[in-house]
């Protein structure tokens, strides 16, 4: 192979490498721009800790503006989503009822732990409208992106 042919081949390989790298980079950027990441908000407290409950709900509301959000209630947290349960208040936040209604209106899935409901002597029929019994598959399918977990 002549020096001129070798140089042309090297330049061709370099251009091909740049093109492939650029195409992969652009494709990845487009995917990142269209795939929303998810936030899994885990609420374990009930009316005994209004700050934790309301902060969790507030974070879910804030994140729902540009992220996929799922809120999971277990342990004492199931009390928060019972029909006729307490409307938890704290001076720094909107009430739990207001925040839950807003999350449901935004289409944010709210899930209660079935075992924790049983432990509290309750059934799925005791949940407020729009709240579902937790389904483990939903924990992984509510967003196509990465999942960040926030615990309260």
Image (cartoon, rainbow, N blue to C red):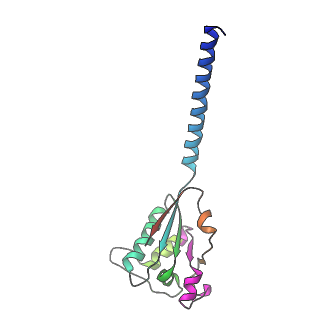
Inspect the magenta stretch and tell me whether residue 122 lies in it. yes
Q: Residue at x 55, y 42 (%)?
A: 29
Q: Residue at x 55, y 47 (%)?
A: 32
Quadrant of image for the C terminus: bottom left
The image shows a total of numbered marks equal to 0
Judge left or right: residue 51 versus residue 137: left
Quadrant location of residue 26?
top right
Q: Residue at x 57, y 70 (%)?
A: 109
Quadrant location of residue 127?
bottom right
Judge left or right: residue 135 versus residue 92: right
Nearer to us in this view, 33 or 147: 147
Residue range in magenta is 104-126
Percent across and percent down for residue 28 are 57, 42
Percent across and percent down for residue 113 are 56, 79
Q: Residue furthest right?
A: 1
Inspect the magenta stretch and tell me whether residue 112 lies in it. yes
Q: Residue at x 56, y 91 (%)?
A: 121
Quadrant of image for the N terminus: top right
Up-down: is 146 above or below 47? above
Percent across and percent down for residue 2 are 64, 8
């Amino acid at each position: 192979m002549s020096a001129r042919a070798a140089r042309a081949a090297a330049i061709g390989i370099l251009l091909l490498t740049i093109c492939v790298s650029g195409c992969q980079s652009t494709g990845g950027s487009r995917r990142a721009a269209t795939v929303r990441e998810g936030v899994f908000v885990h609420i374990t407290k009930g009316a005994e800790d209004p700050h934790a409950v309301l902060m969790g709900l507030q974070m879910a509301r804030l994140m729902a503006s540009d992220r996929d959000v799922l809120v999971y209630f277990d342990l004492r947290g199931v009390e928060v989503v019972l029909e006729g349960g307490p409307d938890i208040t704290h001076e720094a936040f909107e009430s739990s009822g207001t925040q839950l209604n807003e999350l449901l209106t935004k289409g944010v899935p709210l899930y209660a732990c079935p075992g924790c409901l049983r432990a509290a002597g309750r059934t799925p029929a005791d949940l407020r409208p729009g709240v579902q019994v937790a389904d483990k598959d939903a924990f992984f399918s509510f967003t196509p992106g990465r999942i960040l977990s926030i615990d309260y």
